[in-house]
Amino acid sequence: MLPPFSRSRLVKRTVYTTFGLGAAYLADTELNASAVTRNLRTLWTCALISADYKLNFTPEHADRIPAIHQRVADRMYNLFTSNGGLYIKIGQAIGANAALMPAPFQQKFARLFDDAPQIPYPTIARVFQREFNKSPQELFAYFDEQAVASASVAQVHKARTWDGDWVAVKVQKPDVGRQTSYDLMAFRAVMWAFEKWVFDLPVYFAVDFISSHLRAELDFISEASNAQRTATLVASEPRLAGKVHIPKVYPEYSTKRVLTAEWIDGVRLSDREALGRVVGEKLPETGGGMFADIVHDEKKNGIPESMHHVKLRGGMHAIMHTMVELFSAQMFDWGFVHCDPHPGNIIIRTRPGSSSSSKLSSKPVLRDPQLVLLDHGLYVTIRPTVKRQYASLWRALLTSNWDTIRNVTESWGVGEAGLFASAVLMRPVKIDRANGSSSPADSANGDPGKELNAYEQSVRMKERLKRFLVDTDKMPKELIFLGRNMRIVQGNNQSLGSPVNRIKITAYWASRSLVTTHERSTRAWWAHLDARELWRDILFRTAMFSLDIVFWVSKIRQRVRALLGLANGGFEDELERSVRGFAKSTFGVEVGPGAFEG
């Protein structure tokens, strides 16, 4: 038993320690936006994950590995949702590339929504006071204190300027700015530890690139600049002008933490039921893709009054055709790509001045649709050399030009051309063995038909990925975000029943970008043509005919199955099934439905 003096000293130390920890926690919470607490939570979670894999991921415990994956997916999901802020963005980036991850990761990260409780109005008012030295009521003729939408980084309020314009005011949550440096520091440390100690896979190479773009996404002046630049590019492209609208930015009401833009009334792409009504089409009961099961009340605002008696000309085909063309132009012509085109960031409205029916008619007024693109925070600029290589790769993939495929992938430090080609097209590609390339369907380890246990699946995947990323210094980091854009656009197309041949439209833009140079000059249009590339384009267009046949056979099959009351998945659903088979034969991995569409 301790003497009285020792007991008293122990009690005092305990009290002092408790008081000190409490004071530190309070200071971190009130003054530092819980940044230290969030980092400690991150480090603790990652330590648990590392220990779990190190101790239990062994050949002897192969039957326990699915349970390990489930525990790790749960821990990561809980970490991202508990910390919020940039952690949600990082989690979504993982989710967009989760196709070849174990099933629990696919299921968890597919439902990592970027929404959060709104912060109270007095906090918003303090942001305005710091940014403008005015309250929202002083700055605007009307300002709705209740946010119309709230995400992890910012929330949006509806307001009216003194000139009478209705605007959307995006306000960054104050804690985000204080947390960013700590969050990105933790992200860097965790990626380094996972590469060096835990998984022995090249994951750290992209940390700087991703971090810089996440920082840029928090700068609303940069977002305003992105929006204005995109609006100018759209207006200069005859194939998109009028079909696409970028909301007008109000620089006088915008700062680094507050962004004011034109208010848009329309139907969110995420609201499939409302969209089906305004186009007059019955969508598949369950659209495929990563967005099939999203119930996002915040982003399902129904049909605005201005569109109650309107039918959009061209239906879903016109909407998706414009969308695929827009992002193809960004990738292959402009080299300036919006990297977050999920359904909540796309609004469909009527094109101003496009009415072709009398308002006195009882029939719906036929109007042209217009696609409105929101949220211009996350963009990536593609270097001219990479842009041309990417376009060449797309055309080569569809004309079986193996030499070009091999040359491009080798210059990018990619060791498996077939695997990379499959990731680009989002459909299985088998490189011709006669041309010196290995088939992506070949087994990386032993008999491809052999049934693998969970441990063998993971080892095979790890070996294949290490052979895939041969030289990460050569790999263009832009491809990370290009892949994200492509997968989300595929998911949009699939969720609407695959109304367009996405691969064909994208490939045409890739080929056209190689045929025509885009330098500004006064020369006639024909002076911009490249004769050698023009001949290759002719060969490419000939090859596209077979792809068209496949697409229309798929559409006919889809309609017949719908008439018979059977499941009527479209072209993208068939691609999904093919890619799932490809993943099984290549990696021995079972990929869940919908994993490849986001």
Image: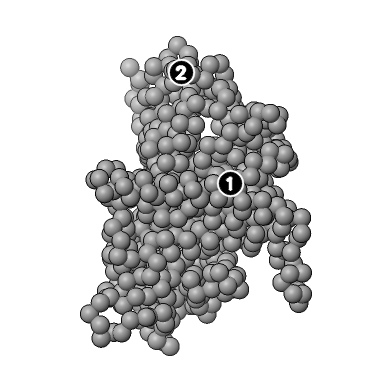
Q: Residue furthest bottom?
A: 163
In the visual, does 334 lie left or right of 115?
right
Q: Amino acid at mark 1?
A: Ile
Q: Position of residue 306 (x, y in %)?
A: 31, 77
Please report the residue visible at 71 percent of the width from the left and 42 percent of the height from the top: 404
Please report the residue visible at 56 percent of the width from the left and 16 percent of the height from the top: 446
In the visual, does 349 lie left or right of 208?
left
Q: Which label sits on residue 509?
A: none
Q: Callout 1: helix, strand or loop?
A: helix
Q: Position of residue 558 (x, y in %)?
A: 35, 47
Mark 2 sits on what residue?
452
Q: Position of residue 6 (x, y in %)?
A: 39, 25
User: Foreground mark, 2 or 1?
Assistant: 2
Q: Amino acid at mark 2?
A: Leu
Q: Quadrant of residue 74?
A: top left
Mark 1 sits on what residue?
480
In which quadrant is the N terminus drawn?
A: top left
* Disc with the residue nearer the chain's start (2 vs 1): 2
**Residue 20 against residue 219 in the figure, above or below:** above
Estimate how packed mark 1 is, as few (under 14), some (14 to 19) or many (20 or more) residues with alpha carbons within 10 Å.
some
